[in-house]
Amino acid sequence: MIDSSLTELRAALDTGKTTSVELATLFLDRIDRLNPDLNAFITVDRERALREAAAADARIARKDAGPLTGIPLAHKDVFCTEGVLTTCGSKMLANFVSPYDAHVVGKLREAGAVMLGKTNMDEFAMGSSNENSHFGATKNPWDVTRIPGGSSGGSAAAVAARMVPLATGTDTGGSVRQPAAMTGVTGIKPTYGTVSRYGMIAYASSFDQAGVFAASAEDCAPVLTAMCGFDPRDSTSLERPGEDYGREIARTPTDPEEPLAGLRIGLPVEFFGEGLADDVRAAIEAALDEYRKLGATTVEVALPNAKLAIPAYYVLAPAEASTNLSRFDGVRYGHRAAEYTDLDDMYRKSRGEGFGAEVKRRILIGTYVLSHGYYDAYYLKAQKLRRLIANDFAAAFEACDVIAGPVSPTTAWKLGAKTDDPVQMYLSDIYTIAINLAGVPGVSLPCGFGTDAMPVGLQLVGNHFDEARLLDVAHRYQQVTDWHRRRPEIAA
Amino acid sequence: MILYKFPRFNSICKHMSLSLDEVRNIASLARIELSDADAEATREKLNGIFGLIEQMQAVVTDGVEPMSHPQETAQRLREDHVTETDRRDDFQRAAPQTEAGLYLVPRVIE
């Protein structure tokens, strides 16, 4: 049952072969067994999960079930959950019980999905390895001495180890796609503005976007469908009608031998240059060969300014973070220092104690680049580069339908390998960040293993609002390969 | 609003390096206490990061329209009427210290 697809779980629930309570119990027991080794969950709420599961069973019994009714899932701890601890991986919010649900949480609850718990993450979603969590690092299920990627590392590891079939995440600079790649699961970050940010604790608001982890693209589709839709509570939520993101997957291809005939896959030269590990390159090349067999053609494209994505991002995102995180002042919620002399001292000590080292660094960078006299040299300059990078994508999509390349230059590294060197950590996001600057959607799907037997992820990038096609392109590959079905030993 | 002007470097673009005092000033603006022991380590790491950021200066961006946001649409407007219910008690439950519906902070006026 733990390896069942969403379609199979749905059928088992609808035909009475299993119940939502049984499913929730099965996965909760796996969490109990595996979490001491993996540390993928910060909070597990068995009682609440079983209550929601019983309600889902009642819905199923009265034939009122949607695609997700009764299916267990986990939320990244960046999403506010009413009455449940919501820490964002930080000491600052270590005791914060949210008084309301995030949009994503509410939508998935309405759909009848059963929340098993909240997953571990880099503090305030700042990090690429999950080692910045106040609650300790999540371990990679494929090798517990390695990182699972970040910042949504807990969600990715939980799906990889089948502690839960589905999990939500957020992607500001690669935080869904990179951990998906590192743990061998499928993850999608939709177009900016597609999923409401209401109740999603803000890091960098012009980049933050919710996404989904599952074992396959086909399983991601209904979750994304349920999460999307206009929400007046987020000023950047797009006023677009809801979409069925599984509609392309459901389509029967004209030529079943070549279901992707006519598809033009763009290969940016910048994503295949120096710095890409040989084993990752080999896995990506093999995946591209598979795509050619499926009828797609490949064409070289250029993203000449993509190399500036990291420097531009580390101006813009910290600038937005320094503003967003000013709300944590020890007054209305969050950590307050035990001793202080006056109000100002209370702010300084509460923030000094409540934030971890990387969060402080990004607040300091942001404060500096926004300060008087430096705005033009840093913030404005970075915004101009953001325009050039967005223009590069627009030009590339004139010549191709989707862009393909690696997610990460290497497979998952050893815990501790980059914790003392933030610049090396930042550079590991070289292939994911440009996508967030442009606001376009991206998918990561497993496409093989490196020489260290760790998973490799293929990244597919679409033009704005092309999620249904992206998921379909990922799905057709998963129809003819089995990388997405491989499970780490620990999950046996 | 407090405007703090940092001393200008001769060329911000080349090999900029923050001094310990500047790091302390930034931390002060951000209302983050930074111990002397942490200040030097923070300075070193920030300088490494700014080394990376300086790569931006290699590209000429004259005449490029800055992009502040991936969506370039106007903000939505709505009717000016009450849409929220009063949930003060729920929201104050998460506060470190409240009294009679008020958030308590150290005395600011003597």
Image (cartoon, coloured by chain):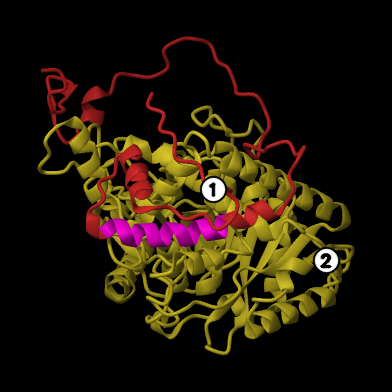
Write the start and end of the magenta stretch as one range: B38-53
Give the camera-side residue of B61 and A270: B61
Is B48 contained in the magenta span?
Answer: yes
For this view, does A418 lie left or right of residue A85? right
Residue marked by disc 2: A260
Pointer 1 and pointer 2 on the same chain: yes
Colour in which the image shows chain A: yellow
Residue A8 in sight here:
no
Q: Quadrant of residue B95?
A: top left
Q: Earlier in the sequence, mark 1 or mark 2?
A: 2
Q: Chief secondary structure of the magenta span?
A: helix
Residue B5 in sight here:
yes
Colour in which the image shows chain B: red
Please state the horizontal and vertical placement of residue A52, each as a whole percent of the image: 34, 49
Give the camera-side residue of A370 and A102: A370
Report the chain holding disc 1: A
Report the chain holding disc 2: A
Residue marked by disc 1: A315
Q: Label 1 to label 2, Cα distance in Å?
A: 39 Å
Amino acid found under the numbered disc labelled 2: Leu
Q: Mark 2 and mark 1 in contact (Cβ < 8 Å)?
A: no
Is A47 contained in the magenta span?
Answer: no
Please state the horizontal and vertical placement of residue A403, each as a whole percent of the image: 76, 61
For this view, does A47 lie left or right of residue A173? left
SS category of the residue bearing label 2? loop
In this picture, is A64 found above or below A449?
Answer: above
